[in-house]
Image (cartoon, rainbow, N blue to C red):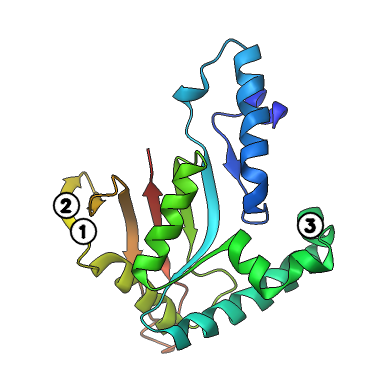
Amino acid sequence: MRRAARLGDELVISVTQRKDDILRMESVYDSELRSLGKDPKQKRTTLNRIFFVVDNPGEKEEAERYFMDIFLGLYLKWGHQNITGMDEGSRTYEQIMRNHFIIGEYSQCIDTIIRYEQLGIGEICCLMNFGSPDLEKVEKSLRLNTSCPIFISQIACKNQKYRDCGNSGIRKLQYGLCASRNATTATAEPIKGAVKYILK
């Protein structure tokens, strides 16, 4: 955290970092900024999270199980210390969902995002195709995320779209949304898209 404050533009918290660690990390980061004569309020902490919008409880559990297997499998294989250092209690289904994912129906996802805002997070970068899930499911998640009627206004800004999320004060920056298939081979190509939530 201290090196990030000295050398980086802003703090980005990995998807591997537990939710319970966020306040501690921000405290160390902000303290180092102050020691350097910088104002922490001028910085915006970004959080990476596996993010998936579904429209029923069955799809929610299916997505959670899929991403949990991929998440643990990949990071254990890579030897990532945040994951290899977990005790068994931290690798349970409930703890992985709580600490690393934002998955659910749209209103559930917004509720989780608001709780992260209360922890001081300024942006959330949504990892919607982590581990290369089925293309059609990713596309459906993207579209559920962009067409929900909770949005009450839309402002065009160059090639980007800002949308207000109800009365929560959260804005969503949507960019690069598209899904494509190779017309020659008829095989699915990766989703090219992302969603970022601007919290403050």
Identity of the residue drawn at 75% across and 64% down: 90
Marks 1/3: CA–CA distance: 38 Å
| Residue 142 relative to residue 115: left or right | left
Identity of the residue drawn at 39% across and 86% down: 184
Q: Which mark is residue 80?
A: 3
Q: Quadrant of the C terminus?
A: top left
Q: Which mark is residue 154?
A: 2
Identity of the residue drawn at 53% across and 83% down: 61
Q: Secondary structure at mark 2?
A: strand
Q: Nearer the viewer, mark 1 or mark 2?
A: 1
Q: Is residue 105 visible?
A: yes
- Pick the front one: 184 or 135: 135
Marks 1/2: CA–CA distance: 8 Å
Does residue 158 sit above or below 177 in this rendering?
Answer: above
Q: Circle 1 sits on which residue?
A: 151
Q: Quadrant of the N terminus?
A: top right
Residue 189, percent from left and from top: 46, 77
What type is the residue that disc 3 sits on?
His
**Crowding near the residue tagged with mark 1, few <14, some 14–19, many ≥20 C-alpha atoms within 10 Å:** some
Residue 128, percent from left and from top: 47, 67
**Crowding near the residue tagged with mark 2, few <14, some 14–19, many ≥20 C-alpha atoms within 10 Å:** few
Marks 2/3: CA–CA distance: 40 Å
Residue 143's image quarter? bottom left
Q: Which mark is residue 184?
A: none
Residue 82's image quarter? bottom right
For the residues labelled 1 and 2, say whether their Cβ atoms are less than 8 Å apart: yes
**Crowding near the residue tagged with mark 3, few <14, some 14–19, many ≥20 C-alpha atoms within 10 Å:** few
Lower sequence index among marks 2 and 3:
3
| Residue 58 relative to residue 28: left or right | left
Residue 186, percent from left and from top: 41, 89
What type is the residue that disc 2 sits on?
Gln
What type is the residue that disc 1 sits on?
Phe
